[in-house]
Amino acid sequence: MTTLQQAIEQVKNAGNKAFVPYIMAGDGGLSTVKPTILSLQKMGVTAIEVGIPFTDPVADGPTIEQAGERALAEGVTLRNVLETLASFRQEIAVPLVVMTYFNPVLAYGLEQFASACVAGGVKGLIVPDVPLEESAILRQTLNPHGVDIVQLVSLTSPPERIARIAAASQGFVYAVTVNGITGARASFATDLEGHFQRLREMCHIPVLAGFGISTPQQVVSMGALGDGVIVGSTIVEALHKGNVAKVEALVAASKGTIETSTPL
Ligand SMILES: O=P(O)(O)OC[C@@H](O)[C@@H](O)c1c[nH]c2ccccc12
């Protein structure tokens, strides 16, 4: 079992749900990467999805797109994020999952990128613009370095495609809960239960729900569909505004505590 999967199974075995926050690396400058990761780690998150800013983030909604623009303006790149991670590697105890589009990886060079992932303690990779059919090259290059390639399943994927994605995904399966881009949603499709039930039957690894989850209540309800949640836009916004209490309330919800007193 891989490090990433193990971290999620451990939470599951304790009767809790995994909580994976997404951060935009370098939103606020490269110097924020270390304190942000260490503070999330201290809050007890299961893993951290580390987003790399990119000029053409096709899957991203306005909140993450704007955070990406701020990070790009700070001169943040795939290379200097990985170098920054390497600089405090010994203090990182939580698995890091890098989320990047394929272009920066190609520009880096696949083998050099793989080495930099090892140096930075990266345990997983999400590349949303590399479809399943073309993902073998990523697994071949990254797996020998202990990096999982996490695949996304969309709500509209036909069953036979879902089965292939489930079989290929590593660490966990990223079950996208909405049709469309990242960002907070007030409501979700009503047939999510059936979708997740079928999905879990096909998966031999944990299933995490992501996209549109922004409140402690949604962390609980969406977490219950599978093995936990990934929360992006709301975390990015809270970190940008320095609203640590909001981040804490979301993490607490994954452990079964809803703090109604927290202003959300
Ligand atoms: O922001 P949301 O709606 O909470 O969704 C998570 C998401 O941000 C994060 O996992 C992510 C950010 N960019 C992506 C691109 C593709 C897939 C996933 C992502």
Image (cartoon, grey):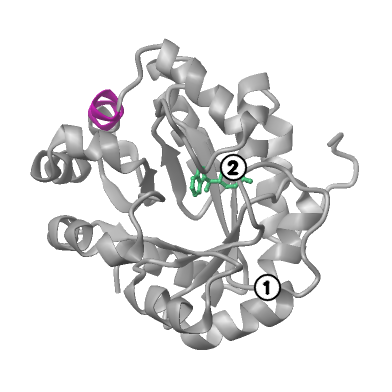
Give the class, few, some or many, for how many residues have Cα within 10 Å of label 2's Cα (few <14, many ≥20). many
Above or below 12: residue 204? below
Residue 101 forms part of the magenta stretch: no
Q: Earlier in the sequence, mark 1 or mark 2?
A: 1
Which label is found at residue 157? Answer: none
SS class, disc 1: loop
Residue depicted at x 40% and y 29% = 54
Does residue 62 appear to the left or right of 46 in the view shown?
right
Which label is found at residue 225? Answer: 1
Residue 249, x across and y down, in percent: 74, 44
Residue depicted at x 61% and y 37% = 61
Quadrant, the N terminus = bottom left
Residue 79 forms part of the magenta stretch: yes
Q: Which residue is mark 2?
A: 232
Give the quarter of the image for residue 214: top right
Nearest to the observer: residue 187 or residue 58: 58
Residue 163, x across and y down, in percent: 43, 82
Task: Mark 1 and ligand 1: say if the CB distance to the nearest ligand atom is below 8 Å.
Answer: no
Task: Mark 2 and ligand 1: say if the CB distance to the nearest ligand atom is below 8 Å.
Answer: yes
The stretch in magenta equals: 78-84
